[in-house]
Image: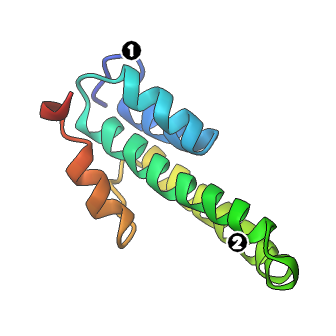
Amino acid sequence: MPKSSIGLSENIAGMLCYILGWVSGLVLYLIEKDSDFVRFHATQSIIVFGTLTLASIALGVVPFIGGLLAPLLSLLAFVLWIILMIKAFQHTRYKLPWAGDLAEKYARKDLI
């Protein structure tokens, strides 16, 4: 298995991009310099879990509907978290419909 610039195998580093949501994605995005695989997963983590975090905050201020939709959003976040960590650990470049395309665009090394 190829190694990332931080000394971990790409699948482990890719999985770690999701472990703390957008926070771990941001950390790995900033420190990974070589692996397109890790940078892709870090970017996708930032996009997906950053969006879910912002949506959760927005739902928190909506009185009735927010209380109804927040548990569904939490369930969605949990399911995505598990799936994305498993796919990264399997060394699969698993793209979510809109976030994956953005992640590919912004994960390129020439943007550093």
Residue under pointer 2? 73
The three-letter amino acid code for the residue at tag 1 is Gly
Q: Residue 82: which quarter of the image?
A: bottom right
Quadrant occupied by the N terminus: top left
Q: Name the spot of residue 42 as percent of width and height, x first.
A: 42, 41
Q: Would residue 41 appear left or right of 85 to someone viewing this image?
A: left
- Ranked by sequence position, the earlier of labels 2 and 1 is 1
Q: Position of residue 89 (x, y in %)?
A: 47, 44
Name the residue tied to disc 1.
7
Residue drawn where x is 76% and y is 80% of the image: 69
Q: Are dots 2 and 1 in contact, CB under 8 Å?
A: no
Q: Identify the residue at image location x=34%, y=24%.
A: 32
Mark 2 or 1, closer to the camera? 2
Which element type, helix, strand or loop, lies under badge 1? loop
What quarter of the picture does the C terminus occupy? top left
In the displayed structure, would residue 95 be above or below residue 41? Answer: below
The relative height of residue 21 versus residue 10 in the rendered view (above or below) is: below
Mark number, residue 57: none
Label 2 sits on what residue type?
A: Leu
- How dense is the environment of label 1, judged by Cα within 10 Å: few (below 14), some, or many (20 and up)? few
Q: Residue at x 35, y 53 (%)?
A: 92
Relative to 74, 1 lies left or right:
left
CA distance for labels 2 and 1: 35 Å
